[in-house]
Amino acid sequence: MPKKVVYEAKIEHLQILDEDGKLDQKLAKDTLTDEQVVYLYEQMSICRQYDEIAFKLQRSGRMGTYPQNKGQEANAVGAGLALEKGKDWLVPCYRENAALFMHGLPMHYVLLHWMGDERGNQIPEDCRMTPLSIPIGTHMLHATGIAWANKLRGDDSVVATFFGDGATSEGDFHGAMNFATVMQVPVVFYCQNNQWAISVPRESQMNSATVAQKAFAYDMPTIQIDGNDIFATYKATKDAAKRAREGGGPSFIEAVTYRLGDHTTADDARRYRDQAELDAWMGKDPLIRTRLYMEGKGLWSDKQQTELEERAKRIVDEVAKTALEIEAPSTSDFFNHMFAELPADLARQRDTMRTSSLGLDPDQVGLGARAQRV
């Protein structure tokens, strides 16, 4: 029998706003309005200031390790605007701060998280999102599960989960992708390919030419976009969310971006990253290109920039003050927020601050047999 081709594929790359602030008018049709562009620029700028203050809090010993979002903000704001606040779910990694704030998370919660205060993970009930996920890749399974539950309930909300290129080398990623397509659940897999899995370059931890092509194994719609382009991040997410909401199942987005800072404040990227590479990506900064575009259209001025910087500083200073001056947590919080209904033995531990229940029932920990031997 003659050979035949049983599968062919191609991947589109989407860029609408280039690094010089030039817009492709045809591709930009029906995407962002001028007002939305200004709004997203403001959100990115506030997030950038947030990073600066968080960095200073860590360096001054008032907060633990912190991962800056610097350079990747266009992904969070574009995707955040494309998803419906109060309806769609965000299942983040830890570089999506702006999207979380846009969807209602109080800004000081993220600082509390990195200060080791568990109240930073107690998401308000009206916010459809999960806490920051530090383990790499595990949260993609949670996103798929939430999306499946929504589908079973007949809820037309969409779940978007964010992760880095390194996470796509984890087994949990493939488990989530496979289940999502088999069950055709409404989830958007959003990969922020920032070129580095901590100190390991993308080409050293995967052999595929793109991250986007990994979706082919699961017959999932996929696209690669310029992750520093707010128009592209918005459009790709909007299209994927529409497909999911209409019963079209999951989608994959590879957003090519770059982290301009270290992996975290515990890292020194100078030890493994070439300065020339960093300099090249500095010119692709999403804030710079967006401002160039706005200035070219007469939407932005030096006066507005000065006012925004002052406003961003006031906002973030107040956020930091709230996190630093919050009343100390109670020892009972550990128990109160662990279960919907606290079991009686744990309630006794909480109220007495003693594990006396173990002593009253030695068999509970296998001590009974040892006592008999003695």
Image (tube, helix red, strand yellow):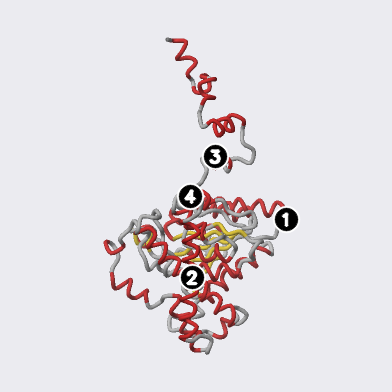
Relative image position of residue 321 (x, y in whole percent): 47, 61
Question: Which of the two residues, 191 or 5, is positioned nearer the viewer here?
Answer: 191
Lower position in the chain sequence, tag 3 or tag 4: 4
| Quadrant of the frame with the C terminus | top left
- Give the residue type that dot 2 points to: Arg
Residue pictured at 59% horizontal, 56% vertical = 181
- The answer for how far apart the CA atoms under marks 3 and 2 are is 34 Å
Question: Which of the two residues, 367 or 277, is positioned nearer the viewer here?
Answer: 367
Lower position in the chain sequence, tag 4 or tag 1: 4
Residue pictured at 41% horizontal, 63% vertical = 68
Q: Which residue is mark 2?
A: 314
- The answer for how far apart the CA atoms under marks 4 and 1 are is 36 Å
Q: Which residue is mark 4?
A: 117
Callout 1 environment at 10 Å: few (<14), some (14 to 19), or many (20+)?
few
- Give the residue type that dot 3 points to: Ser
- Give the residue type that dot 4 points to: Asp
Circle 4 sits in a helix, a strand or a loop, which is it? loop
Q: Which residue is mark 1?
A: 154
- The answer for how far apart the CA atoms under marks 3 and 4 are is 13 Å
Residue pictured at 51% horizontal, 24% vertical = 358
- Give the residue type that dot 1 points to: Gly
Q: Which residue is mark 3?
A: 332
